[in-house]
Amino acid sequence: MKKIGRFLSSMPFAIGLLVLLAAICAVSSTITQGLSYETYAAQYGERTAGLILALRLDDAFHSWWFIGLSAVLCLNLLCCNLIRLPSLLRRSRAFTDAQRWAASGGGEAEAHGGEPMKLFKALGMPKAKETETPEGQKALFSVRHRAGLWGAWVCHLGILLLILGFALGQMTGQQFTLYALPGQTKPLGDTGLQVTVNDFRAELREDGSAEQFTADLTVTEPAAGTTENGAVSVNAPATLYGYKFFQNSYGWGADVRITKDGEPLQTEALCAGDFLPVKDKPELVIYFQAFYPDYVMIEGSGPSTQSMLLRNPAYLYQVYYQKQLLGMNVLQGDEKLTIDEYAVTFENPRNYTLLAVKRDHFTWLVLIGGVITLLGLVLAFYLRPAAVFAVQEADGEWRVYAQSVKGGVLFRETFEKAAGETGFMMKKDGDPG
Amino acid sequence: MLQAENVLFTIVLIGYFAATILNFAFVILKKEKIAKAALILQTVILVLHTAVLVLRGIGAKRWPMTNQYEFAVSFAWALCLVSLIFIRKYKFPVLGAFATPLILLMIGYASMQSREVRELMPSLRSSWLAFHVSTAIIAYGAFGVACVLSLIFLLRGRMKEDGFWDQHIPRPEKLDMISYRSVSLGMLFLTLTILTGAIWAEQAWGSYWSWDPKETWSLVTWIIYAIYLHLRLRRGWKGKAAAWFAVIGFVCVIFTYIGVNTFLPGIHSYA
């Protein structure tokens, strides 16, 4: 068991895992996710399309093997932190133990001279503790940034919490997409809530580009007879009944009016992309395919819009009878579509809102994980633990030893500079101890 | 305002070209006076470069970091700033000789982009924009300098014994350490970029992580540098292998910035 734990927490295993994850993410990002076999086959050929689907590369980041790999990464981080904890605690305690430093009698940099406090101050460690060596020699000791020893450990903990929060959010969270024209009421999935879009405003600039979208919503819980109201804009979501509503996108819709032999039959508000079966002949279906606010027909590419301003509205429709396409065309302005005794007109074009609705109980855990990861990186990179120990020799001269955990050659240079400035002589390699 | 920015941008472009030539002259002629002149020139250009960004911000009435041109100008600015800090902190003028061509390439790339000031789409009208993009700029600048330092590390091993190089290029272990410091700075800021981006995405799109190609490649870059940091802790892998990962990491940075927008469109396609 210990062997397995050691292997799972080992550095080569972690590096291998990271290389694999980076490679998988890179490859998967080049394959458009969530397409059908036919689309992949058209793009890459049938053989590759089959391979993409067989390996679940069409939904790589939700595939069993990617989730498994993420779980192994979590296990690696957990084992690494658990196994390292006792030794890290010992190391952290030992780092401030003056007697241990006295017994070790050395460091990565060493100098001798007269006034140790000057050197301590030059190294940015002005508070030195007075102590004694086991031999009874007078000594001074100072440590700094011991917390830096915990950097990697804290960082691993943060990543672990982040992945855990993300996974729990994915497993327990709810997510819906809802689109509606102003005045329409639609159910919110299976939650029992009803969402009414009271108003939707698309604020456009002079050039027709969008400045802001705002939807006024009323959410009702019919079972309890309660309602909650809120306004949702881009970058300003609203929380209603514990669900977060986001203004995600928008589109166009219109009222579709059908008459039969000149008499009104039905009027429905339809969003582009919606189907409308005729009331007394449901096998006859009108499909509102697209809307062009500033219609223009471009030769070779088909109908299009010149801007998002409502200047020359046109409606692209299809008509189906018993699931067979009867025809399709564009209706401009007040033009009428006639099918036997039925006449269809599109009117009152307006924007609908597309809302993303979400409930995730673990977003806070992801955020905490992120902040802890950041804290770990600060500890690891910017708190470089260092210890300086000075012993007074029998001749009255002071010998100063210094050790830095992450400073390496740069710490040695800093020590040399500080020693030079304070009248200390550096011990060179080969000098007697 | 934008006309003044255009004039100043051209001066900055020419200035970086001159600084690159001066740095090359320093390496070829091995005269320290030239290195000092190059350093002064680079510092002056940085001031003018900052003015370009300020003028752009005033002209566009927003933070100048929302399209390819603005990001490239900011990226080059961060490269210049971080390289100057490292040159001065570690007294390492040769770094300028390797860093200025990279800055010149980036500012050259900016000059090929459209400078038209466009209004922001609603999702970009957020106070998170400044945090998210400015942290990315610092991260990319630091990774660029780390890449340059790693290239010097790798090249140093192939250089013949030469008193000039010994005097002006730090020992390999010090080079490795300086490169590590630069990666550390980049890693911290890249983590901040990803975090602020996630918080912003949660507000704008209702999802803090969507596996959008830009997000995915930011993660790939983060993982590559995480591998670099782990490799440095292993005996035998410290040095060359780690240096290669710092170079690969910067290739990922460039791909995340330019490649993703060109080849892998997603919800970040405006960036």
Image (cartoon, coloured by chain):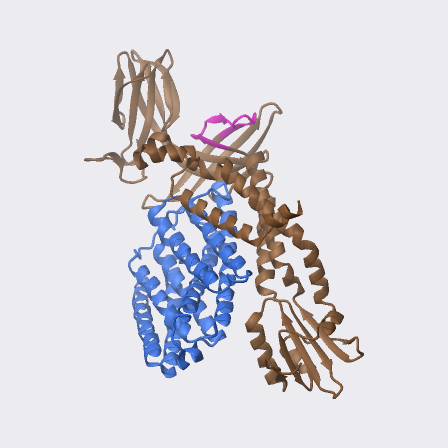
Chain colours: A brown, B blue
In-front residue for pair A144/A353: A144
The residue sitting at 72% across, 67% down in the picture is: A96
In-front residue for pair A282/A47: A47
Q: Is residue A306 above or below residue A285?
A: below
| x and y percentages locating residue B53 in the rendered image | 39, 63
Which residue extends farthest left? Answer: A299
**Residue A280 visible from this viewpoint:** yes
In-front residue for pair A73/A145: A73
The residue sitting at 33% across, 25% down in the picture is: A288
* Residue B24 as seen in the image, left or right of residue A234: left
In-front residue for pair B21/A323: B21
The residue sitting at 55% across, 72% down in the picture is: A409
Q: Is residue A156 above or below residue B21?
A: above
| x and y percentages locating residue A267 in the rendered image | 38, 20
**Residue B188 visible from this viewpoint:** no
In which quadrant of the rendered image does the C terminus of chain A lie? bottom right
Q: Is residue A100 above or below residue B265?
A: below
Magenta segment, which residues?
A176-196
Q: Is residue B11 above or below residue B114?
A: below
| x and y percentages locating residue B121 in the rendered image | 39, 47
The verdict on residue B86 being magenta is no
| x and y percentages locating residue B187 in the rendered image | 51, 58
Res A45 quadrant in image: top left
The residue sitting at 50% across, 38% down in the picture is: A65
